[in-house]
Amino acid sequence: MWNRSFLILHGVENRRPAEHWQYDLALRLREHGEQVFYPQLPDPDQPALDAWGDAIEAELGMMRGERIVVCHSLGCAAWFHVSARRGDTPAADRVLLVGPPGPSAFSWDAIAGFTPEPLDLSRLKLAVATPRLVCSDNDPYCPEGAAEVFGRPLGCDVDLLTGAGHLAIPDGYGPWPSALDWCLDPGTRLTVN
């Protein structure tokens, strides 16, 4: 029986390509004998918040032991909404938020329904432990700066990476050893690839 399990949530237009750091993370965690859930969320090109929320809740229902959630991009925004649904009862023990899209990104019709704008970020209970936010100083999907937009109101522990873009394949984020290290030891600081 597992004493912890991991849920990995991808972003928009993501079909879990083998070159992505999340795919590699799922493989590495499984090699360490961990229980990993890495679902293909419904309709990644035209995602719907309710469908993604329901899929995430279904995955959470299968997790055992300590629940650790790793989100990238739109997966972060989906997690905000799942957390808001649950109110004061966190759905996870630990959460890693990587490259959440900023306010200007939600002008894109495909993801507009995921906007965290109506949520009171300062009241969200994302996890039992302090959530970790990893963001870049030049993310084109969050030019407003994720450390300020999300890190401060959510009370996150922040790792701000220099020149890391959106922390995706075009930015060199295939295997990302420090993401694996954080999963296995939450005291690990995340660094550039």
Image: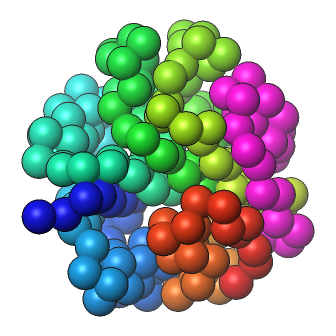
Query: Would residue 183 appear left or right of 39 to someone viewing this image?
Result: right
Residue 125: tell me if it is visible. Answer: yes
Picture coordinates of residue 24, whole percent (x, y): 41, 84
Displayed quadrant of residue 148 = top right
Picture coordinates of residue 87, whole percent (x, y): 39, 12
Q: Quadrant of the C terminus?
A: bottom right
Query: Would residue 1 appear left or right of 137 to someone viewing this image?
Result: left
Look at the image and name its color scheme. rainbow
Question: From what the image shows, is residue 14 above or below residue 30?
Answer: above
The stretch of residues the image draws in magenta is: 142-164
Instruction: Give the residue drawn at x 36%, y 18%.
Output: 89
Question: From what the image shows, is residue 171 above or below residue 31?
Answer: above
Q: Nearer the viewer, residue 79 or 129?
A: 129
Query: Would residue 48 appear left or right of 128 to someone viewing this image?
Result: left
Q: Quadrant of the N terminus?
A: bottom left
Query: Would residue 178 appear left or right of 149 to someone viewing this image?
Result: left
Instruction: Give the residue drawn at x 11%, y 48%.
Output: 62
Instruction: Give the residue drawn at x 24%, y 27%.
Output: 50
Q: Which of 166 and 81 is in front in this view?
A: 81
Residue 104: tell me if it is visible. Answer: no
In magenta stretch: residue 162 = yes
Displayed quadrant of residue 10 = bottom left
Picture coordinates of residue 135, whole percent (x, y): 73, 55
Question: From what the image shows, is residue 178 above or below residue 9?
Answer: below
Instruction: Give the residue drawn at x 59%, y 12%.
Output: 123
Picture coordinates of residue 45, whole percent (x, y): 32, 53
